[in-house]
Image (cartoon, rainbow, N blue to C red):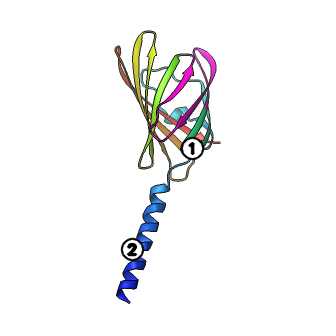
Amino acid sequence: MRTTRRLMLAAMSLVLCAALAQAKPNFNGEWKLNASKSDFGMMPAPTSLVLKITHSDPDMKVVRTQVGEQGEFTNESAYTTDGKECVNKSRFGETKSTLKWDGDVLVINSKMDFQGNEVTITEKWSLSEDGKTLTQNRHFSTSQGEGDVRTVLEKQ
């Protein structure tokens, strides 16, 4: 009887651990900037920012539409969250990124060349418990300095 009970408890523990390990946030949806909760540091804040994300782990596609001082632009990027390098092009050039999970936080490490300067960016994406707020904490580093940006987006 004791052996059966222990086996059942062990099996239940394994099932619970497996379920928790698989419970990654899903960023699917349309997300709009909440400028009052965001902090762009020394960077100019956009007038508007919308992300349309299609996420079926490990695949993720992001369509970013931003309006700001330099006009309006839309960029599409495709990623995988399995740590493999992803290459995307934007108006700023080619960006090489790797994405991986750190618990329930998605960590994105990117490198690009911008006008002859290497730029490295580390982003950490986290989702609120209710799934309605996406926070992106970004640290960037160039030969001209470093900075941090926090972007808060709300699900539409």
Q: Position of residue 150 (x, y in %)?
A: 45, 33
| Res. 67 image quadrant | top right
Which amino acid, by three-letter code, is at mark 1?
A: Phe
Residue placed under numbered mark 1 in the picture: 27
Q: Which residue is mark 2?
A: 10
Question: Horizontally, is 88 left or right of 16 in the view?
Answer: right
User: Based on the displayed image, in which of its 4 quarters is residue 32 positioned?
Assistant: top right
Is 89 inside the magenta-drawn segment? yes
Quadrant of the frame with the C terminus: top right
Foreground tag (1 vs 2): 2
Estimate the spatial distance between the alpha carbons at disc 1 and disc 2, rounded to whole Å.
Answer: 33 Å
Front residue of 94 and 85: 85
Residue furthest bottom as drawn: 1
Q: Residue at x 50, y 55 (%)?
A: 23
Q: Main secondary structure of the magenta part?
A: strand
**Where does the image place residue 86, in percent across and percent down from the top left?**
50, 30
Residue drawn at (43%, 73%) of the image? 11
Crowding around mark 2 (Cα neighbors within 10 Å: few <14, some 14 to 19, many 20+) is few
- In the displayed structure, 91 sits above or below 153; it is above
Q: Secondary structure at mark 2?
A: helix
Question: What's drawn in magenta, residue-wise?
Answer: 63-91
Three-letter code for the amino acid on which mark 2 is drawn: Ala
Label drawn at residue 102 = none
Q: Secondary structure at mark 1?
A: loop
Nearer-N-terminus badge (1/2): 2
Estimate how packed mark 1 is, as few (under 14), some (14 to 19) or many (20 or more) residues with alpha carbons within 10 Å.
many
Expressed as whole percent of the image width and height from the top left, the position of residue 133 reads 54, 44
- Residue found 38% across the figure and 90% down from its top: 1
